[in-house]
Image (cartoon, rainbow, N blue to C red):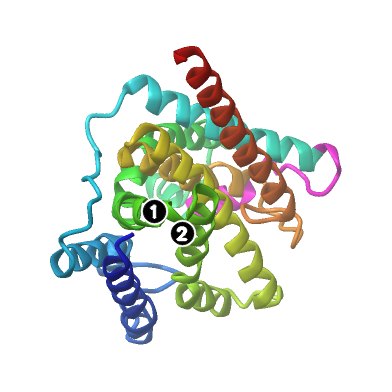
Amino acid sequence: MDKKGICIYLVALFVLAFAVVPALLHFNLIVVREMNLLNTVIFLLMLWFPALAAWIALKLSPSSGVTGVKIWPVSFFAALSITLGVFFIFFLTHLLITLLGVTEIQWGMGTLMNRLKPYIDIMMQQQSLPPTVAAIAPGIGLVGLLLLSLVLGPTVFAGMFLGTELGWRGYLLPRLMPLGRWTAYLITGALWALSYVPLIYSMHVAVESSTPFWSLLVRFVLMLVILGVILGEVSRRTGHTGLASIVLGAFVAQAYLPWRYLFPMSNEPWTGTIGVFSLLVWGIVALLIVFYKQSAETEGAADSE
């Protein structure tokens, strides 16, 4: 096991996460609300800190015995299957909480329409939308967001989070695999989550959330540990870091585009992307992926004998 490389990676990553990120937040170079172009560029660069830490570790500890990562080419069928699979899991989660009466659907898409109102006013020159257009506008917005999430998830969002995957699943995970698959997945996921603590705390303060920070942090860590298992299994089974970034990109696209506008009424800690129901559903998915693949591997080994 490349202990030197692991230590260098973690030291570099957590210096970036707990020193550089707070400095960027302090000087408003990273903001939670109303990001301008500069804020957006810096935030996107921050997502590549894990890749930067991996590059530093490779320079200082080049003899690791771990092969390079694969990010391209990506199978169109695999990318499409992942994108639709993630969409279905989000759909199933929100169907469950709706049937249980935990939250309600906002068919009128009021949150989205309020955000779009300034742009609509400019286009309409401060005139109201015709009644027929206003009646179908929420439906058009919903369909548009769903299509955007399906297109941008495996492309733009996957590209945004490629640096994250290059660091955690591309560099760190293979070096922890001698500890055992589950141990490597859980450690990688937990460290990945903890690296976001300064950013998560800043977001919690900025939105003036009434939810205790410890509750938010625990659920955030649990979700990233669960995602770490899924991403780790995808990376291990395929040897393709690019596919892992597509999984993460599809997840973030679904979380931030259609569902938060269709279900804007939060019922903490039960609903939302890191709500209890979402954690349960994604936890079951992670177990199914791992044990289904494990069963397939066992059968394949038996057949080869």
In this orientation, does residue 103 appear?
yes
Give the answer, above or below, for where 225 lies relative to 24: above
- Residue furthest to the front: 305
Residue at 46 percent of width and 70 percent of height: 196
In the image, is 194 to the left or to the right of 92? left
Q: Which of marks 1 and 2 is nearer the N terminus?
A: 1
From mark 1 to mark 2, how far is it between C-alphas? 6 Å
Give the answer, above or below, for where 204 lies relative to 193: below
Question: Circle 1 sits in a helix, a strand or a loop, which is it?
Answer: helix
Which quadrant does the N terminus fall into? bottom left
For label 2, the residue is 188
In this orientation, does residue 134 appear?
no
Q: Which mark is residue 19?
A: none
Residue at 54 percent of width and 35 percent of height: 86
Give the image quarter of residue 270: bottom right
Q: Does the magenta stretch include residue 17?
A: no
Q: Residue 173 carries which label?
A: 1
Q: Give the range drawn in magenta.
A: 99-116
Q: Amino acid type of disc 1?
A: Leu
Q: Pointers 1 and 2 in contact (CB under 8 A)?
A: yes
Q: Is residue 106 magenta?
A: yes
In the image, is 14 to the left or to the right of 183? left
Mark 2: few/some/many CA within 10 Å (<14, 14-19, 20+): many
Residue at 62 percent of width and 59 percent of height: 222
